[in-house]
Image: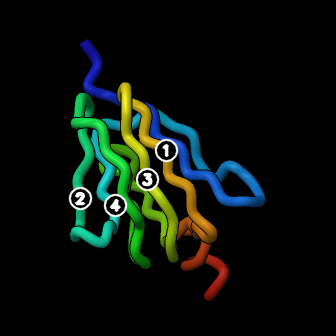
């Protein structure tokens, strides 16, 4: 049995990410929040910070937005999402 769930990061311009992962950490106004498979249904607001996908070693900077988790689908709607790897490469 898989311990993975679907995560999507969407901005007004495009879908930044759609992937399967086993854990995501998000910056919410309640504090850093870890999401695992079968987490209770959740709706919350993002604060500026980093979204981390643990098993994929990916990180995204977000400024604001909303998060919804239900039926093992994590939907992140944000005005801005930047892949940290791309930001580091462009600054070299």
Of 57 and 77, the residue lying toward us? 77
Labels 1 and 3 touching (C-beta < 8 A): yes
Name the residue beneath numbered marker 2. Answer: 33
> In the rendered image, which quarter contains the C terminus?
bottom right
- The image's colour scheme reads rainbow
Q: Is residue 67 toward the left or the right of residue 85 in the image?
A: left
Asked whether the beta carbons under mark 2 and mark 1 sit within 8 Å of each other, the answer is no
x and y, in percent, of residue 61 in the image: 49, 72
Q: Which residue is mark 3?
A: 67
Counting residues from the start of the chain, the first of labels 3 and 2 encountered is: 2
Relative height, residue 59 to residue 38 (above, below) = below
Q: Mark 3 vs mark 4: which is more N-terminal?
A: 4
Q: Which mark is residue 38?
A: none
Which residue carries the number 4 mark? 26
Identify the residue position indicated by label 1 in the image. 75
Q: Are marks 3 and 4 in contact (CB under 8 Å)?
A: yes
């Amino acid at each position: 049995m898989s311990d993975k769930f679907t995560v999507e990061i969407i901005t007004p311009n495009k879908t930044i990410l759609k992937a399967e992962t086993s854990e995501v950490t998000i910056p919410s106004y309640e504090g850093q929040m870890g999401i695992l498979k079968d987490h209770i249904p959740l709706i919350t607001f993002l604060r500026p910070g980093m979204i981390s996908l643990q098993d994929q070693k990916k990180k995204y900077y977000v400024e604001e937005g909303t998060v919804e988790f239900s039926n093992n689908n994590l939907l992140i709607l944000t005005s801005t999402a930047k892949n940290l790897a791309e930001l580091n490469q462009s600054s070299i």
